[in-house]
Image (cartoon, helix red, strand yellow):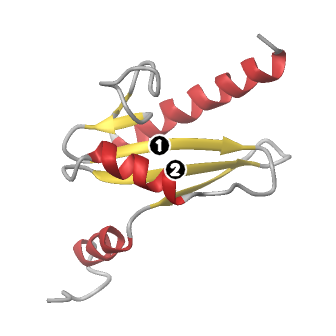
């Protein structure tokens, strides 16, 4: 295994552990390689998270990525695509992509928006 591939795996594992800690969920052992352990992080009946990380200036998000995590969430969990952009100074800028209606619901629950009903 090349050094850069090993480094990418190490960075990804670190990201997944952080996301699991932040969400109160668990890292999915062998995510992507086992049919029953889909997505990278899961908090049962709450969230399903697919993690991506890059050192580049950008990251291309596809509909396929979003639909994949949404399918894996199965309607019982909030699907999230979590992106880390690693900065040259060692810091990380993290973003989460959620469905629009999920975001509106979260903002309502936080008291930021009034009920839409």
Q: What residue is disc 1 on? A: 50
Q: Is 76 situated above or below 44?
A: below
- At 71% from the left and 28% from the top, the residue drawn is 8
Specify the label residue 93 is tagged with.
none
Q: How many C-alpha atoms fall within 10 Å of the one at disc 1: few (<14), some, or many (≥20)?
A: many
Observer-nearest of 115 and 52:
52
Observer-nearest of 40 and 95:
40
Name the spot of residue 19 as percent of width and height, x first: 47, 40
**Secondary structure under badge 2?**
strand
Q: Is 44 situated above or below 65?
A: above
Name the spot of residue 109 as percent of width and height, x first: 23, 72
Q: Is 40 situated above or below 102?
A: above
Mark closer to the chain start, 2 or 1: 1
Pointers 2 and 1 in contact (C-beta within 8 Å): yes
Residue 67 picture quarter: bottom left
Quarter of the C terminus within the rendering:
bottom left
Left or right of 112? Residue 39 is right
As drawn, which residue projects farthest toward the left? Answer: 117
Name the spot of residue 31 as percent of width and height, x first: 44, 26
Left or right of 29? Residue 56 is right
Residue 14 picture quarter: top right
**Secondary structure under badge 1?**
strand
- At 31% from the left and 73% from the top, the residue drawn is 101
- At 26% from the left and 73% from the top, the residue drawn is 105
What is the spatial separation of the Cα atoms under label 2 and label 1, in whole angstroms? 6 Å
Q: What residue is disc 2 on? A: 82
Observer-nearest of 24 and 102:
102
Residue 1 picture quarter: top right
As drawn, which residue projects farthest toward the right? Answer: 88
């Amino acid at each position: 295994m090349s050094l850069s591939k090993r480094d990418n795996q190490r960075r990804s594992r670190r990201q997944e552990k952080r996301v699991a800690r932040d969400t109160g969920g668990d890292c999915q052992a062998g995510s992507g390689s086992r049919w029953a352990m889909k997505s990278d992080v899961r908090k049962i009946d709450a969230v399903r998270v697919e993690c991506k990380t890059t050192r580049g200036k950008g990251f291309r998000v596809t509909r396929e990525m979003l639909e994949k995590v949404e399918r894996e969430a199965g309607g019982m969990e909030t699907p999230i695509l979590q992106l880390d952009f690693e900065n040259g100074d060692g810091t990380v800028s993290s973003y989460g992509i959620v469905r629009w209606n999920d975001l509106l619901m979260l903002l309502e629950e936080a008291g930021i928006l009034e009920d839409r009903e």
